[in-house]
Image: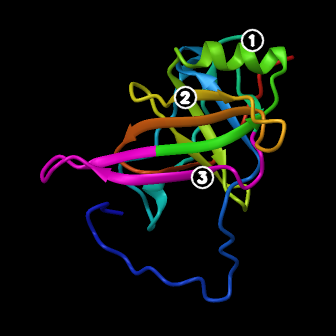
Amino acid sequence: MNTFDLNNLAGPEGDDNTPGLLGYILTARESDFTTIAKAPKTGVKAGDTAIIAADHAFKPGKGWTKQYITLDSNMLKAAITGERDGRGLKVSFEGFHPGNKAEALEFFRVVKNLGLIMLVPDADGTYLQVGSEGLPVELAPDYDSGKLSSGRRGFNVKGEAYANGLYIYAGDVLMKPV
């Protein structure tokens, strides 16, 4: 299908359209991939060019890692950025990871300096990919101890990436060996 053709977009027509995201994200360092798959430039039917159907390939011993995010604290947004004749998207993620276990302190100390590819599952379990080859997502974690009287202890996690569109990742999800 020519991606410059417009197509009809129906409403939910009784199907679920549950908002929100599941309570985790998957991340991998951009440098851990041997191949970062892309969506095709052309397709047979409407929607084909918004799906990354090929599998990502990782270096030996590498793969996706899973980070718990407090349910209903996370949100993904994509806003237009740029000017006429040069528009794209700025994709933003935010969520909360509770606690101050050593593993979390280490993870968020290290991750602030890395380019990542991230899979964010929507409420239906469909993975939206944030970051791509050369345009990784960068995470900026902020720690808050909370107060004895109120608040929550842990990391507010924000991420940003630039993209030309949002894509569904439908390939295999290979987790990093433990």
Q: How many marks?
A: 3
For the point 48% across and 35% down, the residue is 131
State which quarter of the image contains the N terminus: bottom left
- The span from disc 3 to disc 2 (Cα, nearest Å) is 14 Å
- The span from disc 3 to disc 1 (Cα, nearest Å) is 30 Å
**How many residues crowd around disc 1 within 10 Å: few (fewer than 14), some, or many (20 or more)?**
few
What percent of the width, then of the height, locates residue 168?
Answer: 56, 51
For the point 54% across and 28% down, the residue is 140
The single residue placed furthest to the left in the displayed view is: 85
Would residue 62 be visible to someone looking at this image? no
Mark 3, residue position: 75
Mark 1, residue position: 61
Find numbered disc 2 in the image and state the secondary structure of the residue it sits on: strand
Q: Nearer the viewer, residue 111 or 168?
A: 111
Q: Nearer the viewer, residue 39 or 1?
A: 39
Mark 2, residue position: 139
